[in-house]
Amino acid sequence: MTDTPVNDTRKAELLSTKVEHIDIKSFDARPIVDAMKKMSFTSRDLGRATEIYNQMLADPDCTICLVIAGSTSAGGCMDLYAELVKSNMVDCIVATGATIVDMDFFEGLGHKHYQALEVPDDDTLRSLYIDRIYDTYIDEEQLQDCDFTINKIANSLEPRAYSSRAFIREMGKYLVEHGKKENSLVKLAYEHDVPIFCPAFVDSSAGFGLVKHQVDAMKAGKPYLTIDAIADFRELTDIKIKAGETGLLMIGGGVPKNFIQDTVVCAEILGHEDVAVHKYAVQITVADVRDGACSSSTLQEAASWGKVSTAIEQMVFAEAGSVMPLLASDAYHRGHWKTRAKRKWASIFQ
C-alpha cells in the first residue's frame, strides 16, 4: 500500500451494500425446475442437469465432486456451496484459489463482499483500495488481512511440503478456532472431512502470504513451507481409485475442471486400468465452444480423452449464479442426501 490518504467517506459510500448469499433452504425450486423440464433451450438443459445431480445423490455408490471456477462465491453462492457440504451433498471439492481463499476464507475471517451500486472510474477505485469483480466490490485492505492470515498460518506449521488440501485443512482448523462466520465452506469442509483441492493454489491471496513466508524464512536462513501440486494430483487420483463410481458437478471450467477429469487418466498411468470414467457429469458455463480452449471443451469432448461418460452428462450454457440456486434448491428439497453415506475422504490422509 502507498502513503496516499484514502477518502474514507467516499469508500464507505461505495461499500455500503453487502452481497447477501442465497439460502437454498428458504425456497423450494422443485416446481419451477419441473416446469422448465417441459420447456426448451437452456431451461430444458437445466432440468436435465438437475435430474442428473439428483441421480448422483440417489446412487449409493457415487462419490460427488464439486468443481468451482469463477466468481460465483463472491456473487452470492457462498452459502449455497457451504450447504452442499453441511447436508452431505458433495464429497470432494476442486476449486480455484480465489474461490477458496479470496472469497470463502476471506468472509470466514469476518469480511464481506459488496454490491457495486455504481461503478466509477477504476483508477478511482484503486485510489480507494477497492477491488472490483464485475459489479462486486472487495475492500483491498481487508483482503490484505487475508494475505497476512495465510502468512500467519504458514509460519505456525512445520516447514515442509504440503498439498493444497493439507494446507486448506489447516485454514479450516484456524477458522474453527478464530473464524467469525459459521457458514464457511473451508470451515465446514474441515469439520465434515470433505477434502478441498486448489491445483493453482498460489494464484490467489494465499500466494502473497506464502511468498512472504518464504522470503522472510530465507532472509533468516530458516527452512520454509512449500505447496506440492504433484501431491494434489496424486491425492485426488487416490480418491478416484478408492471411490470407484464418481459424479462431477462443475461450475465454470479452467484448471479445476481439467484437474478432476484427469484423475481417470492418471489412475490408468499408475496401472489401475479398471478405474471407470466419471459416470455422471454436469457443467454450467458461459464459455464459447468455438475457440478450442480447455474451459470451453464440452463433456462430449472429454469423453474422447477417456475422462467422462457420454451416457449421463449435461452441459448448461448459462451464468452459474442464475441457475445454481435452482439446481441446488431442487436437490436439497428432494432429499436424496438424507440417506447418503458420508465418505469423509479427507480422513484417508490423516
Image: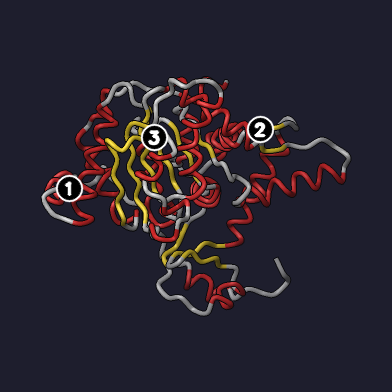
Check disc 3 and report the residue beneath it. 85
The relative height of residue 229 versus residue 109 in the rendered view (above or below) is above
Disc 3 marks a residue whose amino acid type is Val
**Marks 3,2: beta carbons within 8 A:** no
- Name the residue rendered at 81%, 46% in the picture: 216
Check disc 2 and report the residue beneath it. 162
Left or right position of 76 against 191? left
Q: Secondary structure at mark 2?
A: strand
Disc 2 marks a residue whose amino acid type is Tyr
Check disc 1 and report the residue beneath it. 33
Left or right position of 161 against 308? right
Disc 1 marks a residue whose amino acid type is Val
Where residue 171 appears, x then y in whole percent? 58, 38
In the picture, which quadrant includes the C terminus? top right
In the picture, which quadrant includes the N terminus? bottom right
Circle 3 crowding by C-alpha within 10 Å: few under 14, some 14–19, many from 20 = many
The answer to which of 297 and 9 lies nearer the viewer is 297
The relative height of residue 165 versus residue 18 in the rendered view (above or below) is above
Q: Secondary structure at mark 3?
A: helix
Colouring chosen for the image of the structure:
secondary structure
Closer to viewer: mark 3 or mark 1: 1
- Name the residue rendered at 45%, 37% in the picture: 261
